[in-house]
Image (tube, grey):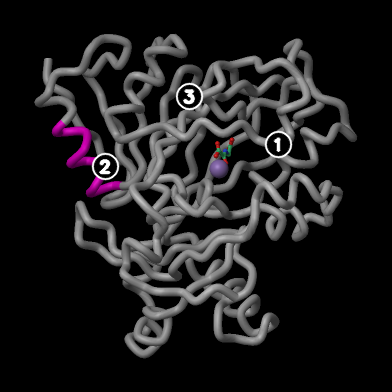
Amino acid sequence: MAAIIYPVTPSFAAEIGDVDLSAPIEPADLAAIKEAFATYAVLIFPDQQLSQDQHLDFARHFGPLETTIGVYRRDAPLRVRKEFADVSNLTHDNEVWGKDSRLRLFQLGNRLWHTDSSFKRRPALASLLYARSIPPVGGHTEFADERAAYDALPEATKRRLDSLVAEHSIFTSRARLGFTNFTDEERRQMPPVPQVLVRTIPESGRKSLYLASHAGRIFGMPDAEGRALIDELVAHATQRQFVYTHRWRLRDLVIWDNRCTMHRGMEFDDLRWKRDMQRATVSDIANSCEQEGVVIEAA
Ligand code: OGA
Ligand code: MN
C-alpha cells in the first residue's frame, strides 16, 4: 500500500501512514516522503517498530549521519549506538538521572528554542527522533516554522537580515541557562561557528530564518545589539501561529528539517518518569554561509 499523507497543520506538520519503516522502503514511498518533507518540514510516522539499525537505515536516506558524541556523555558507557544522540533522562544503567547531574543540566538546553547542531560548522540537515518510552504527562516537543516566520516579516526587515551572519556556539545556549562549567578542553573542541541568519531551502526554494539559542553575536554589530536582534527574531518566529506542538505517542518517529525549523522540549517530571528517545541526525551538505555564498572574514 502506498504511503499516505495526512496534514496536521496546513503547511508545517503532517502524519505519514501506510508505511513500515522497519522494512526496505519502496522508491515511490521514499519520493513521496521527501516531497512531503520539502512541503511540511515536520513529518510524523506513528506506531513504528524500529530497531536501532532500522532507525539508522531510514535516516541515511536523507544523507550522511552525524556521529560525534556529546561531551556530556563521553565519560560513561553509551545506552544507544554511537550514531545516536541519547535524548533520554536516563543514566547509562537506565536509571532516571539525579537532580544535580551534569547530564541533566546540559540537556536543559533542549528546553530553549534551537535547531540541532547549528553550533557545528556543518550543521544538521534533519533529525529523526524516536520515542522508546514516554511519560504519561508532559514532555511534548514544540516546533516553529521559520519559513512562515520569514514570510511574515516586513520587506525592509527581510532586506536587512538577508546579508547578516550570526556566531553560534553550544556554550552560548548553555550560558543562557547559567551553565558555564566547561573545561578549556571542552571549549577548544567546539569553537564558535558562523551561520547565515536567512537561508534558502533548495528543495522548496523557500526562504527561512535560521535561528537558535546557540546564536550569540552578529558579525559587524556591537555584541549587545546582535543579541537583542536575535532575541527579537526568536520571539517573532515562535509566535503561536508558527508553532506546532507534538504530543508524543509511544513509537512515534518524528523527522524535522533543521534548516528551517526550531524546536524545544517541554517540561515533564523528569525525576519521576522515564522519557527515552533516540535521535539520528543527518548532516547538512556544508556550512550555511558556504551554501549561501556568503564570505565571512575570521573575527
Ligand atoms: C532533540 C531535542 C527535544 C525533546 O532531540 O534534538 O531537542 O522534546 N529534543 O526531546
Ligand atoms: Mn534538539
Task: Tell me: 100 left or right of 89.
Answer: right
Q: Which residues are magenta?
A: 31-40
Image marks 3 and 1: residues in contact by CB distance under 8 Å: no
Circle 1 is placed at which residue position?
Answer: 71
Indicate whether 159 appears above or below 83: below
Give the CA distance from mark 1 to mark 2: 31 Å
Where residue 18 sits: x, y (%)?
21, 18
Residue toward you, 130 or 161: 161
Q: Quadrant of the C terminus?
A: bottom right
Q: Residue at x 36, y 33 (%)?
A: 64
The quarter of the picture where residue 216 lies is bottom right
- In this view, the residue farthest toward the right is 100
Q: Nearer the viewer, mark 1 or mark 2?
A: 1
Q: Amino acid at mark 2?
A: Phe
Q: Which mark is residue 282?
A: none
Circle 3 is placed at which residue position?
Answer: 130
Examine the structure image and report whether residue 37 is included in the region drawn in magenta. yes
Circle 2 is placed at which residue position?
Answer: 37
**Secondary element at tag 1:** helix
The quarter of the picture where residue 191 lies is bottom right
Alpha-carbon neighbours of circle 2 within 10 Å: few (<14), some, or many (≥20)?
Answer: many
Alpha-carbon neighbours of circle 3 within 10 Å: few (<14), some, or many (≥20)?
Answer: many
**Secondary element at tag 3:** strand
